[in-house]
């Protein structure tokens, strides 16, 4: 059975189309693997993950809830309709995992928080609806840092997700569950969200492809808000083509999202195989050097050589204000979060702790419902927006954001796409950075610039490097490709050419680590 879980989405779709494989078989193979490796209680219509204290080190814990019965029923329905000759979408019958920050009828949406434990949304997010309409079969909802705040998935109230390459290490975050599901062959595809890097950094640390589309091209309706001006959902997959196909299914104008763009977006599949001959690839001078592990720098240098060999023109570009990106992001994102998370007041959603007065009830609920990182962000954001500090913090950060967007616009005059390492380090050990928020925030140094500018950015596997603490180890390193606004097709094109030439094994090491851990 297990080789069915190792197929790419495109391979599965081809075999489904020829009748060589059924969606029910594909879904069963994944449910079997999830039951064996993910630390779930495989029982009932919706399988729940075990309590954090009951998880063991060999559990990936990618999923919080597995919608087993609904997935089986959807798969059977797709098989029936296919057999009846109905025309189906390109990924019909292929399973997928959904980050637990997107709402879905019939399943919990917890955002990795105790605040929303047991809460079920009465509606599907637009992304969820589009996937259903495309007959992609949702296997379940994935673990994440609480309200998407973090870079390791250790801020989940339900216990950390582990990296399938090395179960002692983190998968990155905040979409660590979605990334680990795909890297560990617990789903061929997943959806994550990226506010400051939460798709790209976990993709890099787990050796898979993850893309943040141009801001505003994927609807935020039903995506529980962290920082609304930055939040964007996007695809995870083991191949560039799979990610591109998945992106086309969710990228659509939506009147239910006031920031949804109306411009038609380019078909990212149409030019996928066009190659990089003559493409100008800009190396961002500021996104390398100090703070980047030597192994990461080596893989990045090799990536540039590869592009050159493939006929691309390498040019050096500068983003002069990018050194301020991290500081600006860590004011803007918490500011927006402090406002967005005000809705969790014990009245409208999820948990309530009763008390004598409404104000006390509100305070007690938030005290019990939010974890330490969420409280930290709310405090920082509230301070940055408060009268007397607003000009010095939030306003200043917003100005820096504009300068960074202009830097990118100028750089794209000289280059078609820009590249950098995705993350300054390979996956670190579970627990290594939990007590050092600033060190954790440094994970995002290369990803937040594109977030602030709203431009599309993707991470793909570029090779492996040794963990500095474990001689002889090999952990994935990601290459980030950034493109101008609404030019997502350029980054996919650059990524596809690289992937074909590199021939990076689609996470066999990730899958292998799980097999030997049993
Ligand atoms: N790691 C970043 C943060 O903690 C980004 C999170 C995200 O993109 N959701 O804010």
Image (tube, rainbow, N blue to C red):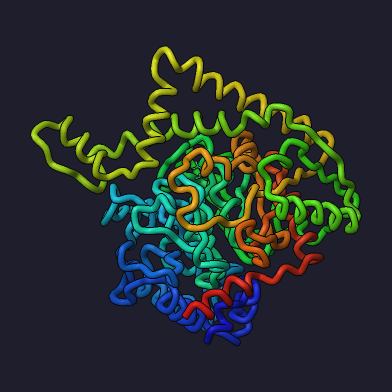
In which quadrant of the rendered view does residue 445 lie?
A: top right
Nearer-the-camera pick, 480 or 166: 166
* Quarter where residue 307 is shown: bottom right
Residue that appears at 51% across and 16% down: 392
Tag count: 0
Left or right of 283 in this view: 218: left
Q: Is residue 81 visible?
A: no
Residue lying at the far left in this picture: please name it: 356
Q: Viewer-proximal residue, 60 or 459?
A: 60
Give the answer, above or below, for where 506 lies relative to 253: below
Q: Position of residue 117 (x, y in %)?
A: 28, 54
| Residue 71 relative to residue 303: left or right | left
Query: In the image, residue 162 lies at what x, y percent?
Result: 48, 63
Q: Residue at x 71, y 53 (%)?
A: 296
Q: Residue at x 39, y 14 (%)?
A: 387
Task: Specify the quadrant of the image occupied by residue 328.
Answer: top right
Find residue 105 and report its horizontal and vertical position in percent.
35, 59
In this picture, is 291 found above or below 308? above
Is residue 208 positioned above or below 147 on the image?
A: below
Question: Vertical placement of 7 versus 315: above or below?
Answer: below
**Residue 357 in sight in this render:** yes
The x and y percentages for residue 245 are: 64, 62
- Between residues 23 and 391, which one lies in front from this camera angle? 391
- 404 vs 46, left or right, is right
Identify which residue is drawn at 50% across, 60% down.
178
Tell which of 196 and 71 is nearer to you: 196
Q: Residue furthest top?
A: 388
């Amino acid at each position: 059975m297990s080789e069915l879980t190792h197929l790419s989405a495109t391979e599965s779709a081809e075999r489904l189309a020829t009748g060589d494989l059924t969606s029910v078989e594909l879904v069963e193979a994944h449910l079997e693997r999830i039951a064996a490796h993910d630390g779930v209680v495989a029982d009932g219509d919706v399988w729940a993950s075990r309590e954090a204290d009951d998880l063991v080190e060999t559990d990936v814990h990618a999923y919080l809830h597995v919608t087993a019965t609904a997935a089986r029923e959807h798969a059977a329905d797709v098989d029936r309709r296919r057999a009846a000759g109905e025309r189906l979408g390109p990924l019909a019958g292929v399973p997928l995992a959904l980050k637990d920050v997107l709402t879905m009828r019939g399943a919990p949406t917890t955002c990795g928080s105790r605040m929303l434990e047991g809460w079920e949304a009465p509606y599907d997010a637009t992304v969820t609806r589009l996937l259903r309409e495309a007959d992609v079969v949702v296997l379940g909802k994935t673990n994440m840092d609480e309200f998407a705040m973090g870079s390791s998935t250790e801020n989940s109230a339900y216990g950390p997700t582990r990296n399938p390459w090395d179960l002692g290490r983190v998968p990155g975050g905040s979409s660590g569950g979605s990334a680990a599901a795909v890297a560990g062959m617990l789903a061929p595809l997943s959806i994550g969200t990226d506010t400051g890097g939460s798709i790209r950094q976990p993709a890099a640390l787990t050796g898979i492809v993850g893309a943040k589309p141009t801001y505003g091209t994927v609807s935020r309706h039903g995506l529980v808000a962290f920082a609304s001006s930055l939040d964007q959902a996007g695809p995870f997959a083991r191949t560039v083509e799979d990610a591109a196909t998945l992106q086309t299914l969710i990228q659509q104008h939506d009147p239910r999202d006031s920031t949804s763009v109306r411009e038609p977006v380019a078909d990212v599949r149409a030019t996928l195989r066009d190659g990089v001959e003559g493409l100008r690839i800009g190396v961002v001078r500021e996104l390398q050097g100090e703070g980047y592990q030597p192994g990461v720098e080596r893989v990045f240098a090799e990536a540039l050589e590869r592009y050159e060999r493939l006929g691309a023109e390498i040019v050096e570009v500068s983003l002069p204000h990018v050194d301020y990106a991290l500081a600006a992001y860590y004011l803007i994102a918490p500011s927006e979060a402090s406002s967005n998370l005000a809705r969790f007041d014990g009245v409208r959603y999820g948990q309530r702790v009763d008390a004598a007065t409404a104000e006390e009830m509100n305070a007690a609920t938030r005290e019990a419902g939010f974890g330490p990182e969420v409280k930290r962000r709310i405090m920082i954001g509230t301070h940055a927006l408060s009268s007397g500090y607003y000009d010095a913090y939030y306003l200043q950060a917003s100005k820096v954001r504009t300068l960074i967007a202009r830097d990118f616009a100028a750089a794209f005059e000289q280059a078609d796409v820009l590249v950098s390492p995705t993350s300054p380090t390979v996956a670190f050990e579970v627990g290594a950075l939990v007590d050092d928020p600033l060190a954790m925030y440094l994970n995002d140094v290369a990803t937040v610039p594109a977030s602030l500018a709203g431009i599309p950015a993707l991470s793909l596997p570029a090779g492996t490097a040794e963990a500095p603490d474990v001689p002889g180890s090999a952990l994935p390193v990601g290459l980030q490709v950034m493109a101008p606004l609404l030019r997502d097709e350029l980054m996919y094109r650059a990524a596809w050419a690289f992937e074909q030439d590199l021939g990076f094994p689609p996470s066999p090491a990730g899958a292998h680590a799980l097999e030997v851990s049993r």
